[in-house]
Image (spheres, helix red, strand yellow):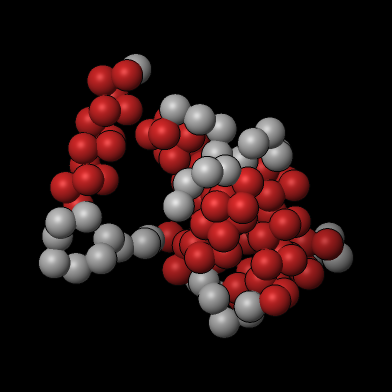
Amino acid sequence: MRIINLCFLLLLTTSSFAQSPPAVVGYGVKSCETYLFTYQGWEQGDEEWIDEYLRYQDWLAGMVTGLSLATDMDVLKGVDIKGAMRRIRLICDEKPGDDFFTASMGLIRTLSSLQ
């Protein structure tokens, strides 16, 4: 397991020397405004929006898992995914022009020592 973490960290380190910034893919590139709309539909129990909300949740779970494995620490400091999704909604309320990745990393930085 440590070898996998080391390989992941090496990939992160070498990618920081690249000319262009690393690409964010998937739901991370969606705007906070879109996430807020989805969150509202999820709260209202609309089946279409529930499915879309779960896609955001799955994307966040994957990112958090990868960061936790790479850093060998719980980057959410015990906050569950549903709690993180609620907190990201609050972050997005304040900055609807940001993307979901930026809001997610804002929460992770607040909860952990990641800079």
Residue at x 27%, y 60% (from the top left corner) = 22
Query: x and y percent of residue 55 in the render?
Result: 57, 54
* Displayed quadrant of residue 42: bottom right
Query: x and y percent of residue 84 in the render?
Result: 68, 49
Q: Nearer the viewer, residue 49 or 101?
A: 101
Q: Nearer the viewer, residue 45 or 106?
A: 106
Question: Does residue 52 appear left or right of residue 39 in this picture?
Answer: left
Residue at x 72%, y 57% (from the top left corner) = 87
Query: x and y percent of residue 112 in the render?
Result: 57, 43
Question: Does residue 33 appear left or right of residue 87 in this picture?
Answer: left
Q: How many numbered discs, if any?
A: 0
Residue at x 54%, y 76% (from the top left corner) = 98
Residue at x 26%, y 20% (from the top left corner) = 3
Question: Does residue 68 appear left or right of residue 3 in this picture?
Answer: right
* Displayed quadrant of residue 9: top left
Q: Nearer the viewer, residue 58 or 20?
A: 20
**Which residue appears farthest toward the top when viewing the image?**
1
Q: Is residue 4 visible?
A: yes
Query: x and y percent of residue 43 in the render?
Result: 83, 62
Q: Nearer the viewer, residue 45 or 80?
A: 80
Quadrant of the rendering where the N terminus is positioned:
top left
Please tell me whether residue 102 is drawn above or below residue 17 in the rendered image: below
Please tell me whether residue 10 is drawn above or below residue 33 in the rendered image: above
Q: Is residue 55 visible?
A: no
* Displayed quadrant of residue 89: bottom right
Please tell me whether residue 4 is drawn above or below residue 21 in the rendered image: above
